[in-house]
Amino acid sequence: MSVGIRHDDLRRRNRAMVIAAVRRSGQPSRTEIAATTGLSHSTISAISSDLIGEGILAESKPSEAVSLKRGRPQVGLSLNPEAAAVMTVVLSLNFLSVTVIDYAGQVVAEEQRRLDTLTMPRDALIGECVAIVRRRLEDPDLDIRSIARIALAIQGITDTRARAMLWSPITPHTDIAFADILEDEFGIPATMENDCNMMAIALRWRDPQRYRDDFIAILLSHGIGMGLVLKGELFTGTHSSGGEFGHMIHRPNGALCRCGRRGCVEAYAGNYAIWRNARQLGEDAEPVADVSDADMRALATAARERDGPEREAYRKAGEALGYGLGSLFALIDPAPVAMVGASAAAFDLIEPALREAIAQTAGGQHSKSISFDTEPNELPLIREGCAMRALTFVDQEIFAPGAQARSGLVGKNVA
Amino acid sequence: MSVGIRHDDLRRRNRAMVIAAVRRSGQPSRTEIAATTGLSHSTISAISSDLIGEGILAESKPSEAVSLKRGRPQVGLSLNPEAAAVMTVVLSLNFLSVTVIDYAGQVVAEEQRRLDTLTMPRDALIGECVAIVRRRLEDPDLDIRSIARIALAIQGITDTRARAMLWSPITPHTDIAFADILEDEFGIPATMENDCNMMAIALRWRDPQRYRDDFIAILLSHGIGMGLVLKGELFTGTHSSGGEFGHMIHRPNGALCRCGRRGCVEAYAGNYAIWRNARQLGEDAEPVADVSDADMRALATAARERDGPEREAYRKAGEALGYGLGSLFALIDPAPVAMVGASAAAFDLIEPALREAIAQTAGGQHSKSISFDTEPNELPLIREGCAMRALTFVDQEIFAPGAQARSGLVGKNVA
DNA sequence: CCTATTTTTTCGAGCCTCGAAAAAATACTG
DNA sequence: CAGTATTTTTTCGAGGCTCGAAAAAATAGG
């Protein structure tokens, strides 16, 4: 149900807005914040004075470039790095990675670890995650008072409430409530996010010009994942993390997918599918558990050298991705696409067939204008996304607290 | 950019909330409104007193059922029918329909007209629309002071700003800015909406229990359209009205679609496609311009009687819809579906293959629990949706006016 | 008629934002 | 180097809004 706006919500929201403005712009002056938020100078002055007093913001020296102007120089506001810290935990195939980030977004500690996620028992997997977090928390070098929030990311499906992993390709176990487990263990609020959603968030922070209101991040890896931002908001499914682009149907009753079904986009474009086609094993061949990056690089090299099954395999991948994107674009209209992950390095092999396929679809009306970026390294992106997600939680829920839970459909209405 | 909340926004929003509460609930008392909005009794009292004074709301007799209780009886608040009026204009194949609706949502006048939309010149089509609106506005019987808003709906693609029809199957002409044309002609704010989106809005008003936050309305007609509500909000494309479900790709390089491309869902499930398959004309046969409802009924009858090409045609339609829905559900998670339009009357022929297909997809994991409603008559639904859309515009922009244009991403943030 | 109960209104207090004016801090000018 | 112009930031009073508490209103039951 819709919920009214109470008087005390006002300050809370405007506080959050000021913090957000500082996080976005680096070192905005009070005047700049007033301009971007539309609030009066007096209000910004009062709020920022509060925030500085609470140790959330700090004044920094005016930027030299501006000091050429006449008049009282602007005073930059910046985030106080010591105001809080957050932790990111990224769990991917055979790899666990943790970072500690200060309030200004700088990495202050990290730890990484190889594990055999595919064969580990459930308890061991959970235990490793808890242990690595504990080691970081107990690190005496860490002068950060306390971690305010933990953001986990994992490949696979998470629930809408960001509490649990429901299913993941990196482990046979399902329904692990990582967020609850870490919260119970350490008493620190935690969320469990989908890796591709974090990629999308990171892209937006990295390049807000390009990745503004509507864009798509596609992970080309062993499987195919997607993070989608529409109208400035992360798009998630209604029950789960959503956006299972890799399991849209490319060809009914087509190639065997890792998910057990047939004809999914992933069954043509995932690493195992490219591998299977390049080795001419047939579309019914059981997907292999993992293909090493080196093997994939060799495949790409072979495909670039001669017109053989390798090249055809990449062509098929491009076709599947193109038709999938075409169907997606039919629903949401075209948007910039970032191709992330090891196979993005082979995007030159994928792109021609992809563009040809997309041009055959309703969404591909302006296929020439659709642009693709590539970013072969997904892990840093996922980490950054987790960090920003955790930090904005702190911004909103800890430093601008209030009846957050009440925020229903304020201002939203279907008709 | 994010925008702060100013002090005067507060009252405006809470006013809008009270009006919305009354529109939803029929005759809520002040106490009920206070409960649903979370605002204090004093605030609700002050706001409703204003609204009554302005003639927007009116007090109505307390409902008898409640008067058995002790204590001061509740006074119901209702919308004052004379506060304003709106007009709906629905343009469909060979048919133009206009209604006038009072502020409480009751139809007070209507007019309908057959036209040959497929062959009419551009100017004639626009002229007919302007003329029918003018006749209604000049009707001396109409004691409504003035029409506050016009909502148009048309089959096809409209732009995101709801100003123009970009493309429609009912006419060869494109890019007609109906909203601007009517605004210029009559000085009344107008919007141009997609018909399926209006269906979705109407379903939500008709049955808020069932069609609450996430659901899908699919128009089974000559073409295939979709209206999608996600997280309580109408989903629209980023550039156009969006949700071109009918042009998701079912089979790459498959049957010829009315849009000129190949393999779209519509090329299997639209009336012309069912007709083409039932007549065994082949998938490359040029789509016919129109199939009469009588012909479609005959086809359905034949399909129910014997296992022939007619039954197979419906089976193929079901398969295409099932795989399409499956791909859609992969992106957004399953949701209730309403099948609307003449062919919804033949949904018994479509459903088995649809369910079988959807079960093959990632989105169909819980395919048994996905439920379908059918509603053969789309026109009343589209009209209702237009009416509610226009009325809520009046609620928000005329009766709770303010710096509406400023509302940026208030409270929204990607991370 | 009086009391209990429930709804609605009234009233003062407390915040919040705003605009205008003042204060602060710098560059330019002669 | 003092005075002036310019720009940023703070201060201060005014006006508005919501809230809680108390009062008023309206009814049923005894």
Image (cartoon, coloured by chain):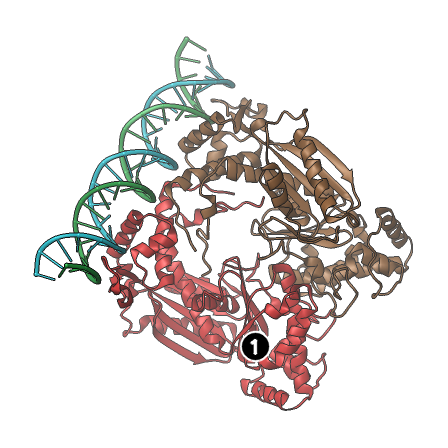
Chain colours: A red, B brown, C green, D cyan
Q: In this orientation, which residue lies closer to the viewer: A213 or B171? A: B171
Residue A319 occupies which quadrant of the picture? bottom right
Q: Quadrant of the C terminus of chain A?
A: top right
Q: Secondary structure at mark 1?
A: loop
Residue A363 occupies which quadrant of the picture? bottom right
The type of residue carrying mark 1 is Ser
Q: Residue at x 45, y 27 (%)?
A: B49
Tell me if residue A22 comes above or below residue C1 in the rendering: below
Q: Residue at x 58, y 23 (%)?
A: B64
Around disc 1, counting alpha carbons within 10 Å, would you say few (fewer than 14), some (14 to 19), or many (20 or more)? Answer: many
Q: In this orientation, which residue lies closer to the viewer: B38 or B149? A: B149
Tell me if residue B376 comes above or below residue B238 in the rendering: above
> Where is mark 1, residue-wise?
A221
Q: Is residue B37 left or right of residue B296?
A: left
Q: Chain of mark 1?
A: A
Residue A333: x %, y % from top left: 61, 61
Tell me if residue B125 comes above or below residue A235 in the rendering: above
Q: Is residue A269 left or right of residue B303?
A: left
Q: In this orientation, which residue lies closer to the viewer: A174 or C3? A: A174
Residue B381 visible, this orientation: no
Residue A338 visible, this orientation: yes
Residue B12: x %, y % from top left: 44, 38
